[in-house]
Amino acid sequence: MSCENVQERISLLLDRKLPARERESMLAHIGACRACGTRFEMMQNQVAMVRGLDQPAIPPQLAARLSVLASHECERTLARASLLARLQCWAARVDLAFDNLMRPVALPFTGGVLSTLLIFTLLVPSLSFSHDIRGREFYTAPAGKMVTNPWDQVADADDDFPRIETPTTAPSDYYNVVDMKIDETGRVVDWSVVRGELTPDMKSIIMLGRFQPATEFGVPTQGTIRVVQSCASATVRG
Amino acid sequence: MATSILDLRSDRASEGAAADNLRLVEGLRTGAGWAYEELIALFQQPVYALAMRLLDDPAESSDVVQEVFLKVFRNIGNFHGKSTLRTWIYRITVNEAHNARRWFFRHRRREVELDSDPEEARNWKEIIPDNGRTPYDVVLDSEQRAAIEAALGRISPIFREAVVLRDITDLSYEEIAAVLAVSLGTVKSRILRGREALREELAGSLKPRPALRLMPETAEKMS
């Protein structure tokens, strides 16, 4: 290897960019040749000196200007973002503004709602209508007392007039017996002949009679009564 | 093929750096504030140092650094990851320094600085001496440093770029090729020529001055 070749490759040798075999031959030549050895040593020192140069420190003013520049460019990038990102940004801003707006109102609003609930809870029992059930039966079967009766004047005096009994009583063979279903308004809604026949008086009661309805826990409800009339009176009348 | 532990470590380190680069680039694209701060913190010092070595002018270097970061921020969408982020930023820096140098030679060549004394331009940190070294060492080092910097400034800008990127910025040959957009062979050639040119400049500037000698005739005249 000639001195010219070696000196052209000194730079590559310093940067370890030569193959191992070529490197060894170069180092052998440098060890043997005084001129190339001196050249190599000088180049080595020079590279070391250049590498040992101090890094110039960045001026504080420039660092501050770069920070400002970065901040402006960041804002600019956000402003030029896609439509979706812009909408999201605006939505976030509106959300934040709404939050900031509602925050002063939030405490009085919550206090108002809670106090309203408290007052309502306390007042509701007193607002409900009390049911005075003292002295009343929980269930009252239709007592048979007619509210409206075209024969009021004769009802008590005439024994032949139909009378009302409880459905549990056993019917007698000499009587016409009809069970009537009374609704909560006191009117007859259904009837069935238990014994005998349906007399005209019974028909009048079905069509015109009004009864005091049965009650359950103080509330009017349906009930059943049994109307009894003697067969003889029915025959006479008929 | 056997793989050494050092190779594995360097591979892992490069993978980690690539992942960091990717994260940083994504942050810059989405306008994340932390990404902008991180980029500035990572690269402001190396970019300024490179610009200073290429231009040897603090004011001009400051302008170049600002231009570089402006271009990085605005063109981050064009960075496709074909090279590393560092290589890309250095490439912009070299191009900007090249543009600034051309502009300087066209427009400001004849301007004269009012504050031409470098000692006055220094700040107090540079003036306070380092007590750990002898004044002789300090003077010698500062002279050598000044000589190298002056020699770097005198060599051709094309060679200077290659030498600075290799010996000061410590880039690999491949990275230098990517930064300068030239082939690997051209990089090798430029580094060699640059170092040779620097050696010649230093050989001229570091020549020993003639020692002070007493001249006999002078002594006779004085007597």
Image (spheres, coloured by chain):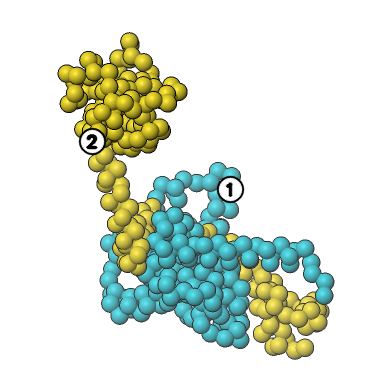
* Residue B108 in sight from this viewpoint: yes
Q: Residue at x 37, y 26 (%)?
A: A175
Residue at the top extreme, as displayed:
A135
Quadrant for the C terminus of chain A, please: top left
Q: Residue at x 53, y 55 (%)?
A: B139
Chain letter, colour cyan = B
Q: Position of residue B201 (x, y in %)?
A: 53, 75
A231 relative to A100, above or below: above
Secondary structure under badge 1? loop
- Front of the two marks 2 and 1: 2
Q: Nearer the viewer, residue A47 or A82?
A: A82
A18 relative to B148, above or below: below
The amino acid pointed to by label 1 is Thr
Chain letter, colour yellow = A
Among the 4 quarters of the image, the one containing residue A235: top left
Picture disc at residue B134: 1
Q: CA distance from mark 2 to mark 1?
A: 136 Å
B201 relative to A177, above or below: below
Which residue is tagged 2? A207
Among the 4 quarters of the image, the one containing residue A220: top left
The amino acid pointed to by label 2 is Met
Label 1: chain letter? B
Q: Nearer the viewer, residue A188 or A125?
A: A188
Q: Position of residue B175 (x, y in %)?
A: 57, 75
Mark 1, Cα crowd under 10 Å, few <14 / some 14-19 / many 20+, is: few
Label 2: chain letter? A
